[in-house]
Amino acid sequence: MDDISLIAVSKVQPNERVAAVLEEGHRVFGENRVQEAEGKWPGFRETYSDVELHLIGALQTNKVRAAMDLFDVIHVVDRLKLARAIARIADETGKCPDLFVQVNTGDEAQKAGVPVGEVDALVAECRSLGLPLLGLMCLPPIGETASLHFALLKKIADRNGLKGLSMGMSGDFEEAIAQGATHVRVGSAIFGARDYG
């Protein structure tokens, strides 16, 4: 249990709510969008230099450089083109965030993530590129039993010798922990309901 990283998902949260959580001593945060994070975190990091920032939303290749400058961990590597872009910039800069491969465990057409049948190949490519791969990430389909998807992700990770499992959110993080999650992404349970207004 001590090894589980609680990522406070601060997307679309007002800065005062984020500041309150920082003041309580929490330092691990997740954002969905590079642009939103660019507007929010440089200022906070001037005061809280030990913040660890995780990108948990889709990443376009044209935002890779900005993402690598800002984030300590990227959870959404889901295609070879993205992995190659990260590797190229890592070679240029000499640094790279830790990475997770995002798996589409439900093989949903509208959802990001590498299809289940293609995970092993993408993991192998990431390794051949020398990328610092921590593990796998998933977002189970809404309305399906999340624990089945968490178990599937763990099985794929074990098969590939990966220890990191980024899975579980406010509504199902206990199930994710029971299935071996190393990183859980919790927003509303920490910050309260989001105001998209």
Image (cartoon, rainbow, N blue to C red):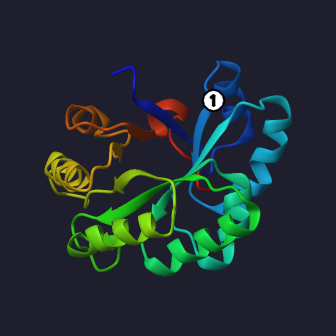
Q: Can residue 113 be seen in this view?
A: no
Q: Residue at 19% of width from left, 55% of height from top?
A: 159
Q: Residue at 17% of width from left, 45% of height from top?
A: 147
The quadrant where residue 113 appears: bottom left
> Residue tagged by mark 1?
27
**Residue 69 coordinates in the image, percent (x, y):** 74, 57
Q: How crowded is mark 1: few (under 14 residues within 10 Å), some or many (20 or more)?
A: some
* Quadrant that contains the N terminus: top left
**Residue 181 coordinates in the image, percent (x, y):** 31, 38
Vertical side of 108 occupied by 41: above or below: above
Q: Residue at 54% of width from left, 46% of height from top?
A: 194
Of 133 and 35, nearer the camera is: 133
The quadrant where residue 22 appears: top right
The three-letter amino acid code for the residue at tag 1 is: Arg
Q: Is mark 1 on a helix, strand or loop?
A: loop
**Residue 136 coordinates in the image, percent (x, y):** 35, 54
Q: Residue at 51% of width from left, 81% of height from top?
A: 81
Q: Is residue 119 left or right of residue 14?
A: left
* Quadrant that contains the C terminus: bottom right
Vertical side of 120 occupied by 151: above or below: above
**Residue 34 coordinates in the image, percent (x, y):** 67, 62
Q: In this view, does 116 lie to the left or right of 34?
A: left
| Total numbered badges shown on the rendered structure | 1
Q: Is residue 178 visible?
A: yes
Vertical side of 175 occupied by 35: above or below: below
